[in-house]
Image (spheres, rainbow, N blue to C red):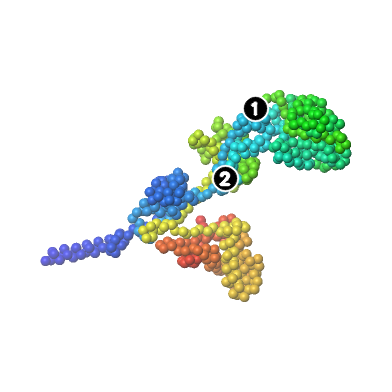
Amino acid sequence: MKKSLLSIVAAASLMLASCDYNAHNFPGLDNGGITDLKTINYTMTAEDYAAVSSNSTNKKLAANNEASDALAAVKTQNAFSLNAPASIYAPAFLDAKWPTADNGSAVKLTYNMQQALPQYLQTLNAGMVYTVSNADYETAWGESGKKYFTSSTTPEANIPTILAEQFDDAANGDVVMVSYSMADDDAAAGGLDEQFEQYNQANSAVSPAIVNGWFNVCVEGSYRWQGRGYQGNGYLQNSAYNHPGGALDCYMITPAVRIQSGMALSFDMAYRYYRAAGGHLHVLVSTNFQESTDSATLVNNVSHATWTDITSEFNFAIPAENGNNNLASAGSYDLSSYAGRTIHVAFRYLGDADGETTTVQFDNVQIKNVNAAVTSTTPVNALYAFNGTTWAPYTAKTVLTLQKSDFAVMGSNYDNFSASMSADHYLPIFLAGKYPYATEGTTVIVAYKYFANNETSLAASEYVFKSGSWVKNTAMEVVTDQFVKNNGVWVYDPSVVISLSPIRNDAAIMAYYQAAVDWVWENVDVPAGCKNKGEGYVTSYGNNDYYSGCSAYYNNVDLRAAKAREQFAAGYEGMSDEEVVALMEERLIEVLAHALEALHPDAAPVDGVDVTYTVKVPLYFGTNVTTCTHQIVYRVVGVGQFEYIPDSFQPLN
C-alpha cells in the first residue's frame, strides 16, 4: 500500500511538473493548442526575392494584375517595384517562410524598393538609335560619295529632315540618338551652303527676306530682296516692277567667309519676265565690306566698300523678251585668288520701274572646296528630340552623350556598352577621370549606346558625386514595412513615415507646418482673445507659431526660447530657457497630432495591425540644420484620429 501511494504521489508530481514545463515552453497548450506568436525583424536576401517571383500564389496574382513581367523582375532586380509592390506580393512569401505563425504575429520586413526613375531618364531610356545612311548623306549633299557632314553641310540643318522621314509616327517628346560622321579636314570646313529652305512653303512671299548672317540692304529705292517659296523650294527674288521710287539698287550680302585654296562660288539663278533693258543680277566680291546691325551705317558701308564684279564669270540663261527661265545652275567661280582672306559676296539687283523690271531669282548659294578630298572623319553621337512638330537637338536636360573617343579612353574599340563591358563598372571610373574636381552633389546625366541581342539601343544613367565617388542613381530605396497576420492572412501594415525636412518653399512640407500654425491660431490664440495675428503665439505673417515652434516659412521647428519670449512674453513669464523648450516640445507633440488630423482625415486603423504615423522634424536652436533631427510617432486609433506613443519623441541617429 505504501509503495502504491508513493507511486501515485510521484505520478501526480510529474504531471504538475509537466504542466509547468508546457505552459512555459508551449503557450496555449492548456487552452487547447500550441500558439506560435512571432515578432521578427527580417531583411530579405537574393534567395528571398527569387522565392517571391516563383511563388505560385504570387504568379496567379500577377497574371490577374497583368504584372507577370514585373513579378519576374523582383528576382532579377532583387527588389520590389511600383508594379510589383511588397504590399501585394510579400504576404504569400511570408506565409511560405513562416507557415506556423499564428494570428497577431508581426514581421518588420526590410527590402529593396525600386522606385520610378525621374521622367527624363525614363524618356531617354525609351529612346532609339539611328545611324545616318549613305542615302541620307546623298540627299543632304545632292550628290553621292560624301559620307559625312561639314560646317557648311551641317548635321543641324539636315538631321531634322532625315529623322522626320525615318520616324513619321514620332510622338511629342520622343528622343533619338543619331550617329553620323563629321569631316575633320580643313578642306571640308568653312565655306557656305545656303538653300533658303525657311521659305519653302508653297507660294509663300516674305518681304524683306531675313536670312541668318546675311545683309539685305538697298542703297537706292525700297524694294529689298524677298523670300519666296514655290512647290516646296525656297529662294530669294527681287524686281523693280511697280517700284514707287523708280531706280532700285539692292544688295543681298553673304556672311563673311574665310577662303581656302580650291574654294569656288556656285549658285542657281533665273530671270523671269525678262527685260533686256535692265533689272539684272550682278555678282560682286569684297574684301573690305564692314558688317553692321545699324541700317544707316550698313548703307554707308556698302557704298564705301570695294566691290569686284565677277558676273561675267557665270553663265546666266537669257530668255526671250518678257520670257521666263526656271532656276538652274549658273556655273561656278574659282575663289582661290582670295585664299587666306575673308570675303563677302553680294547679289546685287539693278533695275528701275521705268522698263528695267526683270524679276531675278537665286538659290542654293555655296562656297566650298571642290578639289580637296576629305581624308578623315570623326564619329559623332548626338541626341535629338521631337517637339510634336519638328526634330531638334535635345535640350530638356544637360546630358553627357558618350562618343567613340570616350569609349577609347575606357579601352574599347566600340562605341557602346554591353554585357561584357558593364556601364555600371566603367562609368564611375570614367567620370572620375573626366571630372577630377567635381564637388559634392554634382550630378551628371550620361547617355550612351547599349548592345544586346544583336541590337543597339539608347540608354541613360544619372550619377551623383558623393563622398569622393560617383554613385549611380538607381532610384532604389531600402524600405522597412510591417506585416501582421490577421485572420490567418498576412496583411501589410500601412504605417507612414513623413519627413518634414527644412527645405524652403517645398509646398508639400509647408502644408504640415502651416496646418500646425493654423491650429494654434484657431484653438489657442483666438480663444485667448487675439483679434489679429501677431498678438499671441502666431506671428503677424501667420506662418510661424511659438506655441509649438512650427514654422511654415523656414519649414522647421524653432525652439529658441528667446524668440518665443519675443513673440509672446506672457506665455512664458517666469520660465527658464530649459522650461520654455520643454513646454514647446510637449506642445509640438500636441500640435502635430492635429496637423495629421487635418491632412490625413482618411487614416484608419486596421484590425490586428499597429498603424503608425512617424513624423520626422528638424529642431532649430540657432545653429543651421539641413535635415531632420528628431522623430515623433503616433498611433492611428480611429478614422483621422492620432494618439502619441509615449517616449517616441526621440533624436534620430
SS class, disc 2? helix
Residue 68: % across, % down:
44, 47
Residue 436: % across, % down:
61, 40
Question: Toward the viewer: 530 or 429?
Answer: 530
Give the residue at x 57% y 68%.
519
At label 2, counting other C-alpha atoms closer than 10 Å, the crowd grade (few under 14, some 14-19, many 20 or more) is some
Label annotation for residue 617: none
Residue furthest top in the image: 371
Q: Does the residue at mark 2 contact the one at mark 1 (Cβ under 8 Å)? A: no
Residue 137: % across, % down:
64, 31
Residue 586 vs 399, above or below: the answer is below
Give the residue at x 67% y 30%.
142
SS class, disc 1? loop
* Apparent side of residue 569 relative to residue 336 in the rendered image (left or right): left
Q: Amino acid at mark 2?
A: Thr
Residue 19 vs 55, above or below: the answer is below
* Apparent side of residue 450 relative to residue 321 in the rendered image (left or right): left
Label annotation for residue 144: 1
Give the residue at x 75% y 41%.
205
Q: CA distance from mark 2 to mark 1?
A: 35 Å
Q: Amino acid at mark 1?
A: Ser
Residue 403: % across, % down:
60, 35
- The quarter holding residue 182 reads top right
At label 1, counting other C-alpha atoms closer than 10 Å, the crowd grade (few under 14, some 14-19, many 20 or more) is few
- The quarter holding residue 255 reads top right
* Apparent side of residue 274 relative to residue 511 in the rendered image (left or right): right
Q: Say which label, 2 or 1, has the lower sequence index.
A: 2
Question: Toward the viewer: 612 or 456?
Answer: 456
Q: Which residue is mark 2?
A: 123
